[in-house]
Structures are given as C-alpha cells and as structure tokens.
Image: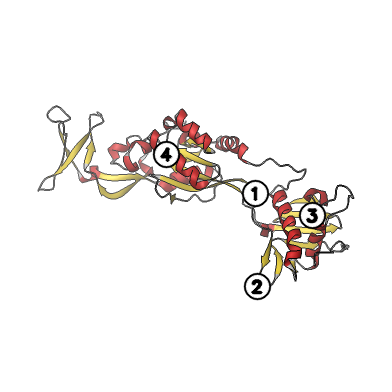
Amino acid sequence: MMRKPPWHTLSLLSGAKGVKADWRDFPERFLTPTNELAKAFPCPKGRGCYMDVVTHKDGTRVGLCPDAPNGCGKRILEKTDLIVYQPNLNVIFSAIGAAFGMTNATQTKLDGLTQCWQIGDYNPAASHRFPVIVSFEGKTQSLERMIGILATRIEKPFFVLLPTASTITSTVQDIASRSSAKLFAFEDIIEISSKGDIQSRTDAVNVIQAASSGWLPVKDCAFSYPTPAGAEWGGFLFEFTADEKLTVSYKKDNFKQVCPEDLGMRNKHTKKPTKLWAFLKMLVQVNGQMSVHDIEKVKPTKQAVSKALKHVFQLDSDPIEWSSKNSQYETQFVIRKAANTKLSFEGFSGLE
C-alpha cells in the first residue's frame, strides 16, 4: 500500500522551510536541518496561528500567543523544537528525474523565480529535449506569472511539476497550454512506497509520453533511422556495401540498410543518385576529411547533405563540420566502405 502524498506541505510553508511541527505528516527522513532557529512556532491547538518565540535571560524559550489572553496561551520550548528544516531536494528531484528517464537530476535554481528549479531535460528521442521544471509555488497568481516568464525564457515546450494538483486551476492550465507547457502534480509522477522510499509511479512513463507526444515532429519521409535518445554523431558508422547501398549503425547496434532514396538523394526523373550521394561516397575516398580549395563551390552541396542527414537521423548538430585550421570538411561520424567492396567514384563534377 502506498502512503498518502505529503507533497502539499512544500507549497504551504514559506520558502519550503519550517520546524518539525510545521512539516506534520511529511516524512522526517526526507528533511534536512538548517542552521536557523524559528522565531515563531505553530499553535499546538491546530488553529493555524503562530506563537511568538521569546528567549529569557536564563536561556529558556517560551512561545507566546499574540492574541492572549483569548489565544493559545504559552508553551515552554526546547531549542530542538525551533530548528528549521528544509526538504532533501536531492532525493525528491532524483525520483522525479527517474520518472523522466534522467540519469542525473540537477538543481539549477532559476533566477528571479521563487522556489523554482530546472532539474534536467526529458529526452524522448534523438536530440529532442524538453526542460523539466520543478516549482513549490502555491499561489495561483504567482504561478501564472512564473509560467509566463518560463515561456519567454525557454521558447520551446517544457514540463512544470508542482507539489499538489490544487494549485493547477483552469486559468493556470489555460496559460500553460498557450505557453506550450504541460503541468503535473507530484502525485502524478512519484509516490512513497510501503517501505517509505520515494519512487516514480509505474505508469509515469506512459503519462509523460502521452502528454508530450504532440511535441515530436511528424516524420514526412518514408525512412527514419531509430536514433536513440541522447545519441551523438560520433557514435555512428556509415559503411558502403555497394554503390547504392549503405549500412548505418549506432555503437554497433541498430543496423539499417540505407539507399539513396532513403536520404532523399535519388533523382525522381532519372532514377539515378544525386550529387549528394556522390558527395557521401567521396567522403569514403578521403576518410571523412575532404580538403576544399573553393569552399563556395562545394558549400551548397555539403549543406544539403548535412540537412538531409540531420532530418533522417533527427539530430540538431552538424554531421559534417568545417575545420578552418585544416581547410577541410570533417565528418563527425565514421564513414568507410566494407571489406572487398568496390565503389564507382562518379558524379563528383563540381565538388572538388
């Protein structure tokens, strides 16, 4: 049996700090003591008010109700009663990060926003990354402002995780929708197990995937390589096995046979490979390092090849970069021909 979510306390306490009496049902194992001592103590009768803490000359501390004699009276307090605690963010953020498939959740405090952090990115495929924001903001008006600021800073879809669903009003949802943001309450993503550990919910992956499915671009070509999340060009091997056949793999996995038409490099009228395909084969001949004497003559072809590869493999970075030091184009992937394969190097006119 899972325990009742205690996350709402994170939004109730100013700065997500308070004495143990403030944290109530929040698991003590997920709290960290600070060096601060509270100047007010919550009413022991549960009225929602606070007692002022007065320290006498002999060192004794007393909590006095400001509404005396009709209030809560007074209470003798120990120093340990007044120690201020804050949540262990590492544990909480790590659990949320795990639900989003992050290997290491971070704690990047966002400037100008109260109790707001970016803990990493959701990386569902290839180079598609969407920031994951955690906020303890509990006031609707402040939350609306926060989402608006995030939208102007991030300028792409993002997630916002809040301690409780009660803060996600229809107005907040509307602003989030217009800002290309998805809102989740902690209880949608994480839970406390019967053993008292914070863990991601079993259905969290499906919930997140469904929410972000519209953020991924629609593939408009017949072929699309299954590039894994977090992939980089350096892990790819392009190996020609024939004049019009290329085997592509990523870190010795996901082997796919690619033809000119798969990369948009076959002329629809003549049915022959275009000079973009010829450019790739030339890279084989020069071991991925193409010296260029007239860059303006070669640049348009190179850019078209890079564009095609980025589209098919769903990566944003340039797969073929220019080295001003060596005056040559250099592939960021390994390109070669298979053993005992003979290639016809034709169609290079205008590339050299």
Residue hosting label 3: 247
SS of the residue under disc 1? loop
Horizontally, is 40 left or right of 131 in the view?
Answer: left
Residue in the foreground of this view, choosing between 162 and 142: 142
In space, the residues marked 3 and 1 are separated at their CA atoms by 19 Å
Q: Residue at x 82, y 49 (%)?
A: 261
Give coordinates of residue 300: x percent, y percent: 74, 59
Are the residues at dot 2 and dot 4 in contact (C-beta closer than 8 Å)? no
Residue hosting label 1: 126
Residue type (three-letter) at the residue carrying disc 3: Thr
Residue 325 marker: 2
SS of the residue under disc 3? strand
Residue type (three-letter) at the residue carrying disc 1: Ala
In space, the residues marked 4 and 1 are separated at their CA atoms by 32 Å
Give coordinates of residue 102: x percent, y percent: 54, 48
Q: Residue at x 72, y 58 (%)?
A: 303
In space, the residues marked 2 and 1 are separated at their CA atoms by 30 Å
Q: Residue at x 42, y 30 (%)?
A: 166
In space, the residues marked 4 and 3 are separated at their CA atoms by 51 Å
In space, the residues marked 2 and 3 are separated at their CA atoms by 31 Å
Residue hosting label 4: 145
Which-is-in-front pick, marks 4 and 3? 4
Residue type (three-letter) at the residue carrying disc 4: Arg
Residue 326 in view in this figure = yes
Give coordinates of residue 267: x percent, y percent: 85, 50
SS of the residue under disc 4? helix
Which-is-in-front pick, marks 4 and 1? 4
Residue in the foreground of this view, choosing between 298 and 204: 298
